[in-house]
Image (cartoon, rainbow, N blue to C red):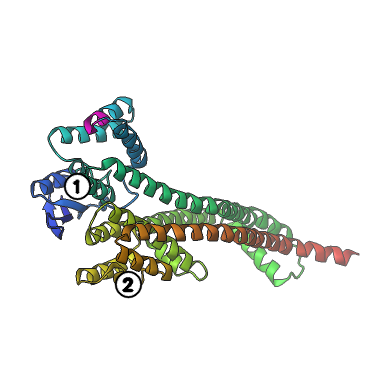
Amino acid sequence: MRFEVRALSADNLIETHSVEASDAGEVGRLLEQKRLQPLSITAVRGSASQSAAFPGRSNKSFSLLLFSAELLALLEAGLSLVEAFEALLEKESSPTARSVLERLMRDLREGLRFSAALARQTDVFPPLYVGIVRAAEGTSDLPRALSRYIDYQTRLETVRNRVVSAAIYPIILLVVGCGVTLFLMGYVVPRFAGVYQGSGRSLPWLSQLLLDWGQFVGQHTDTVFTTVLLLALAAAYWLRRFIGSGRWIVFLTRLPGIGERVRIIELSRLYLTTGMLLEGGIPILAALDIVGHTVSPNTRAGLLAARGIISDGGTLSQGFESSGLATPIALRMLRVGERSGQLGAMLTRSALFYEGESSRWIERFTKVFEPVLMTAIGLLVGLIVILLYMPIFDLAGTLQ
């Protein structure tokens, strides 16, 4: 299988290679022989191919956050790296996690550096993780790097959990509302249509339209049910691919009212990730290459433009400002960081500022959106019921 590889040379230059290998692990070993550090490894052929560096796509049965926390605790207790892995292996029962740890131990005993061993398992350890470990090896401060990554990942999880928590109740409302509407349109309306069919009375046009639909469903029940089921499956498949591709962030940023807030949330993640890498000692250009795998396509294009400005001699603030990646507050903090030599810290502070602002906005948005959504669903269901009962009210009026 052929792999497209982006790697960091010993001179901190980004190189692109095309490599023939059986799997990503073999690609990592070949790059190690050439003294190249992989940034991303992407399989070219095969429908299941994906970038091994894409964030959040590592092996789901292996928790990178838990692994980092346990390894940090063992290292701070005074154990060596190999002893720490031996201890983790003894307590681990998951076959997948044991396989990952065994390969790491084997590579370390063969004399590889920890970062090189991690880079051989690109399906588990993303370039972001490998990069901070590699930078820590240069300063012999692996525990601090692990602590920094744990703090970074915890903050991301906190933001993600807030968004998910805010979305759960509206999603439940939508599902229940759609279920009630489908029940009314697919079961109740056809039976009312049968009752009114032979009445011979003129009906309001909306009621007549609704009852015509009921008659159609009653006559073609199997066809309508099959069509609705196929549409639901197709929508679920499309939605899964849409979310997996990252284009959903681009879509949200174009929505009026919430687009700018979604963009701020993504920029906050960009600042947090870049700040962590710079604080870990990774050069700016290499850090931007790593961060490019953690953002949406639109932001990735902006990063490429910013990288070009920086490689031509510009500063990070100039690159971010020109490519539309700097908010007014972040831009001021970046300039302060460039003057004081605390660029990574200032990026992290910018991220924390917007993280708090985004949390408050999510809370306000949820308080407003939930009642509006509930009202809309209630009005839709109420309209259907009223249209069904209007002929009955009309008939009752004529009998008086």
- Residue tagged 1: 138
Nearer the viewer's eye, disc 2 or disc 1? 1
Secondary element type, mark 1 = helix
x and y percentages locating residue 295 in the rendered image: 34, 60
Residue 197 seen anywhere in this rendered image of the structure: no
Spatial distance from mark 2 to mark 1, Cα to Cα? 32 Å
Quarter-of-image position of residue 294:
bottom left
Quarter-of-image position of residue 306:
bottom left
- Residue tagged 2: 323
Q: In this view, does 271 lie to the left or right of 190?
A: left
Q: Residue at x 46, y 60 (%)?
A: 353
Identity, as a three-letter code, of the amino acid under mark 1: Gly
x and y percentages locating residue 143 in the rendered image: 29, 40
Tell me which segment is drawn in magenta.
80-85
x and y percentages locating residue 129 in the rendered image: 28, 47
Q: Residue 109 carries which label?
A: none
Identity, as a three-letter code, of the amino acid under mark 2: Ser
**Badge 2: residue crowd in 10 Å (few <14, some 14–19, many ≥20):** some
Quarter of the picture containing the C terminus is bottom right
